[in-house]
Amino acid sequence: MLEMLAVILLIGIAAAAVAVSVTQGLASARVSAASGELAAALRATRTQAIVHGNEHTFDVDIRGNTYRADEGKPVRLPSGMRIGITSAKEDQVNATTGRIRFFPDGSSTGGHITLQRERRQWQVNVAWLTGAVSVADVSAKL
């Protein structure tokens, strides 16, 4: 009877460890997916600037945890996730909103947007010269 109780206890500990691991994996996957969607939205905004031959903007609202291209509908991040932006001073719309502008030649004002959930952090970079968008996992550097 005591052996059976010990086995049940070990199974419970193993199940708890697996549950924590799965939960952390899901959180990481959510941040990764959100950063991919954000990068795709930035690339689409750049493409629109090139195709239409005029300037297009991409706004990030850190208070509302949202982003939006031009005057489109804001996209809200999943709960528990935070967003931040580093952009040119002249592209700070207000105290909580930053902007990255894309030009008809494909270039941009540049900057980077950070997505974070718990200890997982991803950075979406926009090169000013080319307007190229890249995603980097910066969690390992923390």
Image: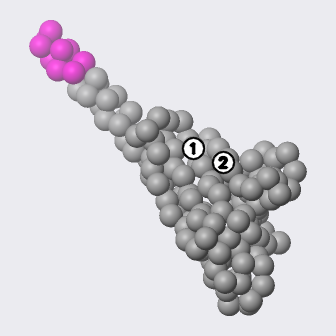
Q: Which residue is mark 1?
A: 116
Q: Which residue is mark 2?
A: 83
Q: Earlier in the sequence, mark 1 or mark 2?
A: 2
Q: In the image shown, does 78 or 32 lie closer to the viewer?
A: 32
Q: Is residue 134 above or below residue 136?
A: below
Name the image quarter holding the N terminus.
Answer: top left
Is 102 magenta? The answer is no
Point 76% across, 60% down: residue: 99
What x and y, as percent, mark residue 139?
Answer: 45, 41
Point 58% across, 74% down: residue: 130
Query: Callout 1 environment at 10 Å: few (<14), some (14 to 19), or many (20+)?
Result: many
The kind of secondary structure element at disc 2 is: strand
Is 9 magenta? The answer is yes
Q: In the image shown, does 13 or 90 lie closer to the viewer?
A: 90
Instruction: Write down the region rendered in magenta.
Output: 1-10
Whether the residues at callouts 1 and 2 have beta carbons within 8 Å, the answer is yes
Relative placement, left or right, of 22 versus 118 is left
Query: What type is the residue that disc 1 sits on?
Result: Gln
Query: Callout 2 environment at 10 Å: few (<14), some (14 to 19), or many (20+)?
Result: many
- Residue 37 visible? The answer is no
Query: What type is the residue that disc 2 sits on?
Result: Ile
Q: CA distance from mark 1 to mark 2?
A: 6 Å
Point 55% across, 67% down: residue: 133
